[in-house]
Each structure stands twice: as C-alpha cells, then as structure tokens.
Amino acid sequence: MKVILINGSPRKNGNTFIALSEIAGQLGRHGIETEIIQIGHKPTRGCIVCGTCKAKADNRCAFNDDLCNLVNEKMETADALIVGSPVYYGQPNGSVLALVQRMFYSAGELYANKPAAAVAVCRRGGATAALQTLLMPFQIMNMPVVTSQYWNIVYGREEGQAALDKEGMQTMRTLADNMAFMLENTAGKTHPEREARQSMHFIR
C-alpha cells in the first residue's frame, strides 16, 4: 500500500514538511510506503474550466507545467492521499487549493473512494478554517476522511518549531495509525455501488 502526501508549503523543510514527515514515519511502521511531493516555488495554475480533460477523458489536465498531472499519475497506483498546508490569512496556501481543484476535476476517478486526510500548520490562529477548506473536496469525491484524536493541526512559526508541538506530533501519529487501520481493513474490498449522479441547480 502507498500513501501520497502533498506538502503545500513553498518551504521544502518547513513546519508543514515536519508534520507530514511525522505521519510518513508512522505509516512506515505499519509497512505502508509513502511519498511526499512538495509544491515548491513554481506557479500553480488555477482551473479555467476549458473542458479539455473531460473531452479527452484521460485523467490529465490540459496544463502540463506544474504538479497536477504528476500527482494524478501517482494516484493511479496509490491507495490514499494526505494534503498539508500552512495557514495564510485563515486559509490554505492558494497554490495548493488550485492544485487540488485541478487534480480532482481532471482525474476524479483516480481519487474516489480512497481515504484522505488534511493537515493545517499555523503560527497561532485560522487553522480550523483552513482545515475545513482542505477537507471539503474530499467529501465531494466520495473519499473517506481519516480523523485523529484532535483536529489535524500543528503549531509553529519558525522553521523546525512544529517538532516542539508534542500534542501536534502525537495527533499526526494517531492520524497515521487511523489511516493504516482504514487501509488494512478495506484492502481488496469493493466500494458501495453508486446511484447515477443527479445534479441540479436552483435557477428556474
């Protein structure tokens, strides 16, 4: 089994990386392979609803100059997804939101029914709002949300301070344990049969 973790911070070895590394280490103790993909400093495009991915139906975004298609390719064989982000003005990093939206829109079938979790890292406040924002796309995609002993939040401002948040680090390990439990107990099982989707809006 394998879990993909997205580090939504431009800082390669910052506090978000520390939080995700704690999760990865604990998943490793369960024999689960992990890979952390870092968003870095390159621009991440937002979706322009061009429809190319839907027309081609090839699980690829028309834009091929950032991480979107790379993550989609890795999710073809991965079993779960974790997205971590620093908190900016009470919200996740805008780049990671743009990335996730395009991932799910262009290749939703690769993500559906796979367990997912989000992690928010902040200096002081705004983490619950950012965490909720990260979780909402999972619920639309039929992705079981993995919880922990507390909200998946870690505190720290300067690089490395997240490691001093003992409760936060324990929360990350518990998240990993819960993810491992879910994967181990759903491996090889089929997801519930879905009804044909009915979509509507409220303009008559």
Image (cartoon, grey):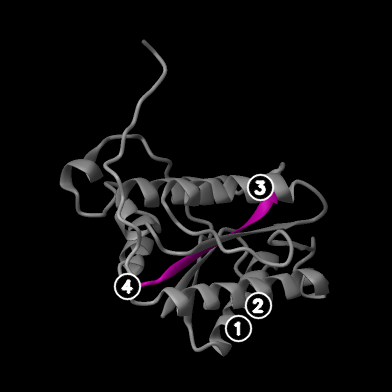
The answer to whether residue 174 is seen in the rendering is yes
Give the numbered dot on residue 25.
1
Q: Which residue is mark 3?
A: 130
Secondary structure character of the magenta stretch overall: strand
For residue 123, side relative to residue 198 (left or right): right
The quarter of the picture where the N terminus appears is: bottom left
Residue at screen point 57% across, 78% down:
24
**Label 3 Cα crowd, 10 Å radius (few <14 / some 14-19 / many 20+):** many
Residue 95 visible to an observer of this rendering: no
Q: Looking at the image, which residue is at 32% across and 72% down?
A: 77
Q: CA distance from mark 1 to mark 2?
A: 5 Å
Disc 4: which residue? 77
Q: Nearer the viewer, residue 192 or 28?
A: 192
Q: Earlier in the sequence, mark 3 or mark 1?
A: 1
Q: Secondary structure at mark 2?
A: helix
Marks 1 and 4 close (CB-CB < 8 Å): no
Residue 153 numbered mark, or none: none
Asked if marks 1 and 2 touch (Cβ < 8 Å), the reply is: yes
Q: Quadrant of the C terminus?
A: top left
Q: Are marks 3 and 4 in contact (CB under 8 Å)?
A: no
For the residue marked with disc 3, what is the amino acid?
A: Ala
Where's residue 156, x and y in %?
79, 63
**Residue 52: % across, % down:** 22, 41
In the depicted structure, whether residue 62 falls above or below residue 35: above
Which residues, given as a range, are shown in magenta? 77-87
Reading the image, the residue beneath label 2 is 22
> Which residue corresponds to the image point at 41% horizontal and 63% vertical from the top-left?
114
Q: In terms of sequence position, does the residue under pointer 1 or pointer 4 come before the other?
A: 1
The residues tagged by marks 3 and 1 sit, at their Cα atoms, a distance apart of 24 Å
Please tell me how crowded label 4 is: few (under 14), some (14-19), or many (20+) other residues with Cα within 10 Å.
Answer: few
Indicate which disc, 3 or 4, sits on the residue closer to the N terminus: 4
